[in-house]
Each structure stands twice: as structure tokens, then as C-alpha cells.
Image: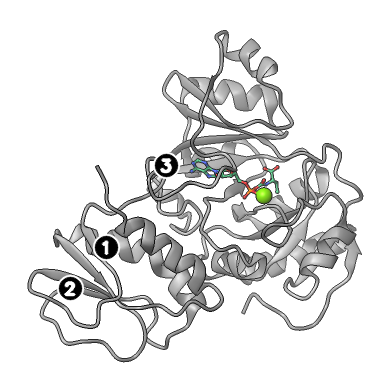
């Protein structure tokens, strides 16, 4: 399990502590670590259950795609498709507070929950030496949002993290106060197109010098909450989605939850046959994709309880079921 009931105190980021933290990551547990922007709440990005633990710990009522942290460009190229322009930006600003949203390489092994089912992935190589050493030692890409409870300020000191998440992580690495105290700049890159999704520590002017044109800005994405009407940046299944299904109708695929599943001849994927919400969150996006791939016109979805991660799961399902143009 990624959650612990005992409270942990920040630990000075010595080489031994970093090695221990890397072991926690490799074992699927959560580690808070310093970056030059804000502290991150990290988990193995290839382990869907570990990533579900991030959402559980933060108490986030929705699944936002997460940034994948890597030691450098070589590791980033294994999980994302770099265009020449993306490579140039990485060479100029990495390691540092720039996040690049690029086409995701399926063979990179990043869990669907990290990208909230999108075909793109956000990557960044942090400059903080503790973060860099941790990422090298973990030998895994690390998904990490800011290490605060949902709705609270982003943490710039290890003690901020302890106040919010001390009871929910395996370890908090203390690397001193974050240098920037402001999140990374998020850029989406699609061929020659570069769009600013979130302003941050790297300025638009600095980016414009590299791309040699004005930077486009998007009202989508970034940290703005997206309403069901703004589905463009979110994965939506091709099939229609029928919520709160207690039975399965002719031609429907079933997204089940829990031990008691209605009878059907059609395709079924169970989010968790034991009714475990962490397991359900971990499999949500892959399950939707798998059912979509069956070609069923409608995906019937059994009710999922609203407690814990159920809130984020239901938020995602409501968006998938919202009418589309
Ligand atoms: O400075 C930072 O970026 C910190 C440290 C820990 O690295 N992390 C951080 O993560 O701020 P978070 O989860 O709070 O913000 C991630 C941002 C969100 O605005 C999210 O929408 C965007 O990155 N993002 C991630 N993946 C994306 C994708 N595939 N497409 C569009 N936006 C994406
Ligand atoms: Mg945040």
C-alpha cells in the first residue's frame, strides 16, 4: 500500500536517505521530494496503483494529468516523442523548470492514470540535485504533482509537506527551501506549434527567444478546471457512456465495479472485483480504452461509491458521459 498511518518527519537528503527514498519509489510507495520549483509528491509512473495513491493522498476530487520527472533528455525520449523543436527547448532549459507536453510513446510504459488517458505526456527534468539523484537512483520515471493537499498552497519547504501529507507518504526528503517557489512552465508541442498551457518559472520571453516566434497561449489546460463542456484536452471514449447501470442492454459493453456483476453476453471489464477504489482508479483509463476498443456503441457503467477516490472516479465518468458535439 502507498498509504501509511504513521506520521513521517522530513529527513535530510543525504545520499543514504536518497537511496532509501528510491527504494520506496521502486516498491510502489509515495515519496515527497524537493525540486527547484515546489516539492513534489512522487510515485513510480509505470505503476498505476502507486499513481492512484498520489490522488488518494492529495484528496484530489478529479484526475488531472501529472508531470513525469526524469533525470534528463535520454530518459525523456523513451516515454515521449521529441520533435526537433522540443529537443532544442530541452537542451536549452533542462535540467530546469520547463515541462514539455508531447506525444506519448506507448512502449514507454507510463500508466494511463498518469496522463488521465491522454495520448500526450508531460515530462520534465528538474534541476534540483536531490531530485536528479533520486530520479537516477529510482531508475523509474516519477509522476509527481505538487506535494500539497488538494486546494492548499503548493509547498516550498519540507515542513509544508509534512503538515499536509506527513501521514500519507513513506518518506519526505528535505532539500531546503525551493529556489523558485513557483511551478514549472508547461508547454504543449505539436510539430512546429508551441502553446503555453501554464505560465511558470521559465518566462514566455525566454521561450520566444528559442522558438523565434510569439508564443501562443491556451485557455485550455493549465491549472484551470475544465468543465464537461471543455473536453478537448481530456480523453473521452468514442462510445457513449451510460452511468448508474444496474443491468446491461443489448449491444452494450460493461464497466463493472465490485463483486456483484449483472449478467451479460457482451464485453466486461471490472474496475475492481473486490470493490477497492485504489485499484479501480488505477485501472479506470485502461478499462475505458479496452471497452472502447471492442467497438461497442455504449459503455454501461455500474455505480461507484463517492467516498475516497470514488469522487475523482465519478468526476471522470461524468465527463465521459457528458453530451458532446
Ligand atoms: O513545478 C512543477 O511543475 C511541479 C513540480 C513538482 O515538478 N509539479 C506540478 O504538478 O506543478 P501539477 O500536477 O500540480 O501540475 C501539472 C500541470 C497541470 O497544469 C496539468 O494540467 C499539466 O501539467 N499537464 C500534465 N500533463 C498534461 C498533458 N498530457 N496535457 C496537458 N497538460 C498536462
Ligand atoms: Mg499543483
The disc label shown at residue 233, or none: 3
Give whichever of discs 3 and 2 has the lower sequence position: 3
Question: Which of 78/257 is in front?
Answer: 257
Task: Determine whether, in the image, residue 188 is placed left or right of residue 294.
Answer: right
Q: Position of residue 274 (x, y in %)?
A: 41, 88
Mark 3 and mark 2: Cα distance apart in space = 27 Å
Question: Which of 94/198 is in front?
Answer: 198
The disc label shown at residue 290, or none: 1
Q: Mark 3 CB in 8 Å range of ligand 1?
A: yes
Question: Which of 56/318 is in front?
Answer: 318
Give whichever of discs 1 and 3 has the lower sequence position: 3
Q: Which residue is mark 2?
A: 267
Of circles 1 and 3, the one toward us is 3
Q: Would you place residue 307 above or below residue 81 in this image?
A: below
Determine whether label 1 and label 2 are within 8 Å by CB: yes
The disc label shown at residue 150, or none: none
| Residue 75 seen from this side | no
Of circles 3 and 2, the one toward us is 3
Name the residue at the bottom extreme: 260
Mark 1 nearby-residue class (10 Å; few <14, some 14–19, many ≥20): some
Amino acid at each position: 500500500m502507498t498509504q501509511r498511518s504513521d506520521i513521517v518527519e522530513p529527513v535530510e537528503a543525504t545520499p543514504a536517505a536518497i537511496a532509501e527514498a528510491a527504494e520506496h519509489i521502486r516498491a510502489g510507495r509515495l515519496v515527497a521530494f524537493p525540486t527547484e520549483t515546489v516539492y513534489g509528491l512522487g510515485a513510480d509512473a509505470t505503476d498505476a496503483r502507486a499513481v492512484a495513491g498520489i490522488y488518494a493522498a492529495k484528496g484530489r476530487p478529479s484526475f488531472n494529468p501529472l508531470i513525469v520527472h526524469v533525470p534528463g533528455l535520454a530518459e525523456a525520449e523513451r516515454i515521449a516523442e521529441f520533435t526537433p523543436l522540443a529537443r532544442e527547448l530541452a537542451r536549452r532549459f533542462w535540467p530546469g523548470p520547463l515541462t514539455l507536453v508531447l506525444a506519448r510513446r506507448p512502449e514507454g510504459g507510463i500508466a494511463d492514470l498518469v496522463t488521465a488517458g491522454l495520448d500526450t505526456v508531460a515530462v520534465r527534468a528538474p534541476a534540483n540535485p536531490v531530485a536528479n539523484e533520486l530520479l537516477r537512483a529510482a531508475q523509474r520515471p516519477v509522476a509527481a504533482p505538487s506535494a500539497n493537499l488538494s486546494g492548499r498552497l503548493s509547498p516550498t519547504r519540507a515542513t509544508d509537506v509534512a503538515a499536509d501529507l506527513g501521514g500519507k507518504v513513506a518518506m519526505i526528503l528535505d532539500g531546503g527551501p525551493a529556489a523558485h517557489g513557483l511551478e514549472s512552465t508547461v508547454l504543449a508541442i505539436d510539430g512546429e506549434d508551441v502553446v503555453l498551457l501554464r505560465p511558470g518559472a521559465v518566462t514566455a520571453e525566454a521561450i520566444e527567444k528559442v522558438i523565434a516566434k510569439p508564443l501562443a497561449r491556451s485557455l485550455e489546460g493549465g491549472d484551470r478546471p475544465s468543465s464537461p463542456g471543455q473536453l478537448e484536452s481530456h480523453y473521452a471514449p468514442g462510445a457513449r457512456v451510460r452511468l448508474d447501470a444496474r443491468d446491461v442492454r443489448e449491444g452494450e459493453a460493461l464497466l463493472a465495479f465490485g463483486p456483484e456483476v449483472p449478467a451479460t453476453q457482451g464485453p466486461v471489464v471490472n474496475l475492481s472485483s473486490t470493490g477497492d477504489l485504489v485499484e479501480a482508479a488505477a485501472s479506470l483509463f485502461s478499462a475505458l480504452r479496452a471497452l472502447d476498443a471492442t467497438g461497442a456503441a455504449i459503455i454501461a457503467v455500474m455505480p461507484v461509491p463517492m467516498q475516497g477516490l470514488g469522487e475523482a472516479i465519478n468526476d471522470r465518468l461524468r465527463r465521459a458521459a457528458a453530451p458532446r458535439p
